[in-house]
Image (spheres, grey):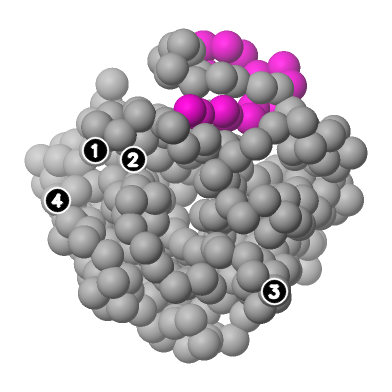
């Protein structure tokens, strides 16, 4: 009998890549995917008839509960979430990110299903309080998105004590074709010569989409201890300056101009202003390019059979997507 899988977030970078990888496996699964009502069909049409797509808003807790009561699944990939910077109320963030996770926990405990949860290294804050951040590092709810991920992890790990078989993966900022988040915007700003490259060493740690995808596939195909929680990012961090120069060379054949370097104090001033205005999106943007952020991932590579991916030259996939 085919295992029955439920997956959320298939219209996003990670969820879509995970679903593609599952469909490419020699083992066949009975797959159901949840998408937000009103989602344009072309955003998931590539999966064809191999996946049953159901319109269900994760923020509609009563509707989600009814859906789960009427269906049966062996594995739940909970990857979908409202990301930070979106113009939703805190109540909607809470319902879609935390309360929906509670529903999946309750369902999996009741039916003995496995829960594979996509969290975020944002549980340590945009800028971790200690480097490299590891599983025991302090949590920092510096924005509401991060708060919902921290609380979701607490709900899951508490449920593990009562029999839930779950695993948590925390990807760093993920890059790959099809996404227009921080990595894409970085390429765009470097190409337009408007990126404020700070004049000090900033270490950053990104995650290739293939890496987090293979981590989820490993969880699907292998046995593991309930409560497993791992950070997922490229094999090593790298200097932001090195990445900016790499992007510039690939696009324009030369390093980024030194004349466009800026003093760290200017970015810190922008960060303080954004924080005073309570603008979480701009606060995060200033933080990410003026402070170091990287994570302990050795245990992840030791536990899973993951490819050894290094951001340079792997970041070429974002540059190629931008050029197209």
Residue 287: x %, y % from top left: 53, 67
Residue at 68%, 45% in the rendered image: 82
Residue 74 position, x and y percent, is 55, 44
Helix, strand or loop under label 4: helix
Magenta region includes residue 34: yes
Q: Residue at x 37, y 63 (%)?
A: 223
Name the mark on residue 317.
1
Could you say which disc has been placed on residue 313 in the image?
Answer: 4
- Neighbor class of circle 1 (other Cα within 10 Å; few <14, some 14-19, many 20+) is some
Residue 162 badge? 3
- 282 left or right, relative to 277: left
Label number found at residue 48: none
Report the quarter where the C terminus lies: top left
Residue 137 appears left or right of 261: right
The reply, left or right, for residue 18 in relation to residue 310 is right
Does 31 appear above or below 110? above
> From mark 3 to mark 1, how far is it between C-alphas?
42 Å
Query: How far apart are the two marked residues, 3 and 4, measured between alpha carbons?
Result: 44 Å
Q: Is residue 302 above or below residue 175?
A: below
Quadrant, the N terminus: top left
> Disc number at residue 176?
2
Would residue 286 be seen by someone viewing this image from the given angle? no
The quadrant in which residue 133 appears is bottom left
Q: Foreground: 227 or 266?
A: 227
Instruction: Pick out the residue farthest to the left.
Output: 253
- State how far apart marks 2 and 1 are (Cα): 6 Å
Tell me which segment is drawn in magenta. Answer: 30-43
């Amino acid at each position: 009998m085919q295992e029955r899988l439920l997956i959320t977030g298939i219209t996003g970078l990670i969820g879509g890549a995970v679903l593609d990888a599952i469909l490419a496996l020699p083992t066949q699964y009975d797959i159901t995917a949840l998408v937000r009502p009103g989602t344009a069909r072309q955003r998931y049409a590539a999966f064809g008839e191999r996946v049953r797509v159901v319109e269900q808003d994760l923020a509609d807790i009563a509707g989600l509960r009814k859906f789960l009561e009427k269906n049966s699944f062996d594995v739940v990939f909970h990857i979908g979430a409202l990301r930070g910077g979106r113009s939703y109320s805190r109540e909607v963030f809470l319902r879609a990110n935390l309360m929906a996770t509670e529903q999946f926990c309750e369902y999996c405990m009741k039916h003995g299903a496995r829960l594979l949860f996509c969290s975020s290294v944002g549980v340590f804050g945009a800028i971790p309080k200690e480097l490299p951040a590891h599983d025991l590092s302090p949590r920092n709810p510096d924005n509401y998105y991060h708060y919902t991920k921290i609380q979701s992890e607490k709900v899951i790990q508490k449920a593990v004590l009562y029999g839930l078989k779950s695993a948590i993966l925390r990807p760093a900022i993920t890059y790959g074709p099809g996404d227009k988040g921080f990595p894409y915007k970085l390429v765009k700003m470097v190409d337009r010569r408007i990126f404020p490259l700070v004049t000090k060493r900033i270490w950053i740690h990104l995650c290739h989409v293939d890496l987090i995808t293979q981590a989820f596939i490993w969880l699907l195909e292998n046995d593991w201890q309930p409560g497993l929680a791992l950070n997922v990012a490229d094999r090593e961090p790298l200097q932001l300056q090195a990445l900016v120069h790499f992007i510039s060379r690939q696009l324009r054949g030369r390093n980024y101009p030194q004349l466009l370097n800026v003093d760290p104090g200017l970015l810190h001033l922008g960060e303080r202003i954004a924080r005073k205005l309570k603008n979480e999106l701009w606060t995060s943007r200033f933080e990410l390019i003026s402070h170091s952020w990287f994570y302990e991932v050795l245990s992840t590579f030791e536990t899973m059979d993951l490819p050894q991916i290094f951001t340079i030259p792997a970041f070429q996939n974002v540059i190629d997507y931008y050029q197209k």
